[in-house]
Amino acid sequence: MSLDPLGPVQIGAREIYDQLLQTDRKVDAVRGEVAQVAQAHGELVNDLTDHESRIRALERSRWPLPSLAALVAIASLILAVLSFTRGG
């Protein structure tokens, strides 16, 4: 007496072939979705790079403003001290 793991179930070549075709279609669908995700990721990387460069440009253009304000304040303080010491 041999033990058959499938019992009385019989699977033919046609059933195996049909199942293989279903699996192939599912793999193709997943492949298409992966391609879409990869494309979206590439676009996000490009957007991130663009935003990063724009932020860096804004930061470079703004740094002189606080420095210039500090220099004007120091110059005003020096002029006020000089004016006060000269009796003006």
Image (spheres, helix red, strand yellow):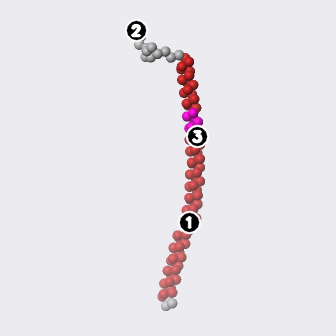
Q: Helix, strand, or loop for circle 2?
A: loop
State the separation of the CA atoms marked 3 and 2. 54 Å
Q: Is residue 83 above or below residue 7?
A: below
Query: Is 86 in front, or is 21?
Result: 21
Q: Can residue 12 be found in the magenta stretch?
A: no
Q: Camera-side residue: 22 or 1?
A: 22
Pointers 3 and 1 in contact (CB under 8 A)?
no
Residue underneath mark 3 = 36
Q: Which residues are magenta?
A: 29-34
At label 3, the amino acid type is: Gln
**Residue type marked 2:** Met
Residue sitting at x 58%, y 44%: 40
Report the quarter where the N terminus lies.
Answer: top left
Q: Residue at x 49, y 15 (%)?
A: 10
Q: Position of residue 20 (x, y in %)?
A: 55, 24
Residue 16 in percent (x, y) is at 53, 20
What residue is disc 1 on?
62
Residue 37: image location, x then y, percent:
56, 41
